[in-house]
Image (cartoon, coloured by chain):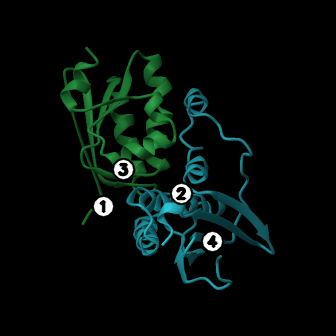
Amino acid sequence: MKHFQLRSRIQDQVAVIYPKGHLDAHHVERFEQEIRRIMENRVMRIVINCENLDYISSAGMGVIMGYLDEIREKMGDIKLCCVNNQVYDIFDLVGFTDIYDFLKDENTAIRAFA
Amino acid sequence: MFKVEADLTVTIPSSTELLKMVVELTRHAVEILEFPDKEVQQIALAVDEAITNVIKHSYRYEKGRDIRIEFFIAATGLKIRIIYAGIAPEMDPEAVSVERLIKQKRKGGLGVQLMRKIMDSVEYSSSNGLNICEMIKWKKRETVG
C-alpha cells in the first residue's frame, strides 16, 4: 500500500492538487515536484484539496510555505480546502491559518480566485 | 516521576522510510497513557519532527545510522528521549515567525517550532559523541488517571 499519493488537475486556470495519505519527509519530494511543475507551467493559482490528507509534518508545510512568496509576487496564491480537524490543528499550531485562506470546499476555493 | 530505565526502547536505522512506523509506534505508546486523541496525534508529530531533524541535519540523510528512541511512561506524563550520533544540532534560541520564513522563501524552520509548541519541554544536549533530544509532555490535571 502506498502511504502517499498525489494527483492534480487544472480548472479555470486554477491548479487543484489532491494529496492523499501521509505526507512526511519521505514523500515530500514528490509534493514539491508537483508544485514546481505547476509553477513552471505558469499557473500561479493553486488550491490544495486536503480532503484525503491524513497527516502532514513540517516537511510538507515547508513546501507550501517556501513557494508562497514567489507565487504571490506573480499575483497568484495558494489556498487550502477540505482540511480535516486534525490536520487543521497542525496548520493552526504553526500559524498557517493566519496566512492562508482555508475554505470549506473546493468550488469555493476555486471561485475565491475569481 | 519517570523511572531511570525506559519502559520501551526502539532502535531504528536512519531512514525517512521508517518515519510513518515511528509515528504509529508513538501513537500506541501515548494511547497507553490515555492522552486525548488530539494530543496523541500531536505528540507523534513531535517525534516525527525530532527524528526527521536527526536524519536531515545530524546524519545528512546517510542511511543505516542508529537512532535510539526511549519512551518513559508515568501516570503524570510521557518522556521521550532520542539518542543519536552525527553532527550536534544547532538550535535557534528564538522562534522565527512563519511570515519571516515565507519572506525568506525558506522551506525549513518549522520542525523545532512544532516540537516546542506541542511538548511541554524540549531539550537538546551532547556529550561523548552522542546527542540527546529529550521531550516531555505532562498530562493535564483532569486527564491524570
Instruction: Name the residue that disc number 3 marks.
Output: A86
What secondary structure is marked by label 4? strand
User: Is residue A17 shown left or right of residue B98?
Assistant: left
On-image quarter of the C terminus of chain A: top left
Q: Are marks 3 and 1 in contact (CB under 8 Å)?
A: no
Residue linked to disc 1: A3
Q: Colour of chain A?
A: green
Looking at the rendered structure, the kind of residue marked 4 is Arg
Q: Are marks 3 and 2 on the same chain?
A: no
- Indicate which label's residue lies in the foreground, 2 or 4: 4
Within-10-Å neighbours for mark 3: few <14, some 14–19, many 20+: some
Reading the image, the residue beneath label 4 is B81
Q: Secondary structure at mark 1?
A: loop
User: Looking at the picture, which amino acid does disc 3 mark?
Assistant: Gln
Rendering quarter of residue A26 = bottom left
Q: Please rate how many residues cluster around mark 1, counting C-alpha atoms within 10 Å: few if below 14, some from 14 to 19, many from 20.
A: few
